[in-house]
Amino acid sequence: MKSLYKIGICVLGLSLVTSCTDYEPLDFQVEKPESVALQEELNSYEALKTYLGEDSSDFILGAAVSISDYNSEGLMYRLINLNFEEVTPGYGMKHGAVLQKNGNLNLAAVEEFLETANAAGLSVYGHTLVWHANQNAEYLNSTIAPTKTEGGPIWEVVTDAYFETDEAANYESSANAIVSFTADGEGSGGDGRALKVTNEEARENEWDSQFFLKFSPPMEVGEEYELSMDVRSDVAASFATQAHIQPYEYKHWDFFGAISATPEWTTFTKKIVVSEEVAGASTIAFNLGNVATTYYFDNISLKKYNEEGSGGPGLDPSVITNSDFETGIDGWAGWGNGSTRERSAEGGGFGDTGYAFTFTNPSAVNPWEAQIAYDLPTLEMESTYVLNFKVKANTAGTLSAAIQSPSDYSSDPLGSFNVSEEWKEYTLQTTITKEDRERFIIDYGQFAGTVYIDDVTLSRVNPGGTEKTPEEKEEIITNEMERWIAGMMEVSKDYVHAWDVVNEPMDDGNPFELKTGAGKELAADEFYWQDYLGKDYAVKAFELARKYGNPGDLLFINDYNLEYNLDKTRGIIDFVEYIESQGATVDGIGTQMHININTSKEKIDEMFRLLAATGKLVKVSELDVAVNSSEPTSEMLAKQAEMYKYVVDSYAENVPANQRYGVTVWGVQDSSDDANWMPGERQSLWDLNFSRKPAYASFAEALQNL
């Protein structure tokens, strides 16, 4: 259309000094520039949300915006509020924006955004919970990094008591057990003081006088503990130990066995493997009621076995795989001096449970004349290997261990160790100096007697740490997903009632398969949850969103290029069916639609038909239309306007009204030439100066048909 301007002109006289006070205005009519007329027409349109049809009450018109732009309450804030009903944060609610280096969630900006949008009367679409991009990958990778240990397993102190102060938080006694302290210098070895527990008379029941040692956390089945203490009594006595949940809450009659005391200080040490009978215990009860005497306790220590240890280098998995002999003694051999080897009877293993490997030498000869052996895989040259094992014998003696080359019997010695009638644990190590060190041996020719060994491991020291198993990684990443979703939902659930739960799951080249990071050089913010949790990563994500969100929240899965590759549309539909077959519920499917002026309209129609056939809600989640030029012609802008309208018209035609969640425009302003997102593509409804483009009008007109 064209308009006319009226222009008054000041006519100058012949003399330059003549003023314009004496002139007669002349009326001229000129054509208004077409670009000005077009812009005036665009500016005459009302706000976009006013064009929604009467039958579109359930349809939501949304826009994406950066949290910082919206929170600043400037021009972008006013434009969004004027034209749209819902706002989607482009980046600010993603994992990488919220999760800090230390693993904490910084949700301050999110909370401000939610409150600001709510005050403006806009709903918020949550974007996005689980994705492979825009993640704090550095933190997530740190949680599954190799475990570092101090070169091998360690015994960690759970609780101890030395009685040098009156601090008694971890012990107490019953009424018949009178507690006091010795004088200084009367403790074990004449050093410090000891605890005195007096039972004044022999009781009807041994448990009528009790002393309790408390600890935490409660024991679990399979854990290994060691109790040690120095003990004596005025007269010889023996007392039993019971397992209690807490003092006076009896669990099991036997715990660390019976303890003998005499007038001389002796050291008691006993290791146990926690059974079902004592699991849950957090108190050791000493039953002192049988004998009228005073007992003295010093240097009490309860330790727990930690397989991995902590800090420092880690250990690779053991190269000795038959370590505990529970299924037999395969792989173990021996020879020399008429010695014999066999698996022990049941109960002959460490802690009087399970089995051990036992070997007997009838007479003392040279050390190498009787040996046991285990053939090893190829070991790494110049690497350190750590041997850990438990051992006892029917008499005292000394044995030695080495890693040997069968070709010439040379070896790298692990060292010697003493044996006795009590189980002892040893950790020895050596460095491999020859390539064919292929046999682990124990020399016992010099020892006449029977030896028992159990829990034998030989592991390479790995400076990078011990790699976690796939099962461990799955558990860790599952917990991280839950912590992330729970934290986000905690601040959002009062404001957000629709979520992009799983974003961009399907692979572009194999659209019926999930994306994977395997074999790729990943960006700093890429982390593929599915590589650790498998296909069920999405099942877990939907379950957690449902658990921590509101019961009526609408939960979406979302992907791009569905209109470009219809097999990808079919692939995500199949994936939704899988998720729901595992018990989770998916309410809707989002199609991003980052398209251009030449995108196939036929494929757009077919995509909407395929999505509609699922019966799910369908959301156009990230709509923009690129013109493929930073200096678009009027023809390009006309095509852009046509495509914006076509998308909405096709959506209305092919998706039933009750399945239309809505359309979100992905960025309302064109991208600059140096922008991170679609640089120079001029893809939006407003240009760089926030002027409306022809697409604004066509989009508004299409909204009326919903």
Image: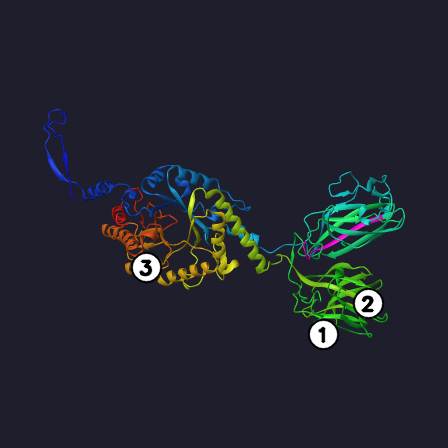
Q: Magenta part mainly helix, strand or loop?
A: strand
The CA span between labels 2 and 1 is: 29 Å
Residue 257 lies in quadrant: bottom right
The CA span between labels 2 and 3 is: 79 Å
The residue pinned by badge 1 equals 407
The CA span between labels 3 and 1 is: 73 Å
Q: Which residues are magenta?
A: 220-231
Q: Amino acid at mark 2?
A: Thr
Q: Nearer the viewer, mark 3 or mark 1?
A: 3
Q: Nearer the viewer, mark 2 or mark 1?
A: 2
The residue pinned by badge 2 equals 450
Q: Nearer the viewer, mark 2 or mark 3?
A: 3
Residue 671: horizontal and vertical position, in percent? Answer: 34, 47
Quadrant containing the N terminus is: top left
Q: Is residue 196 above or below residue 462?
A: above
Can I make out residue 528 in this image? no
The residue pinned by badge 3 equals 609
Q: Magenta segment: does it hold 226?
A: yes
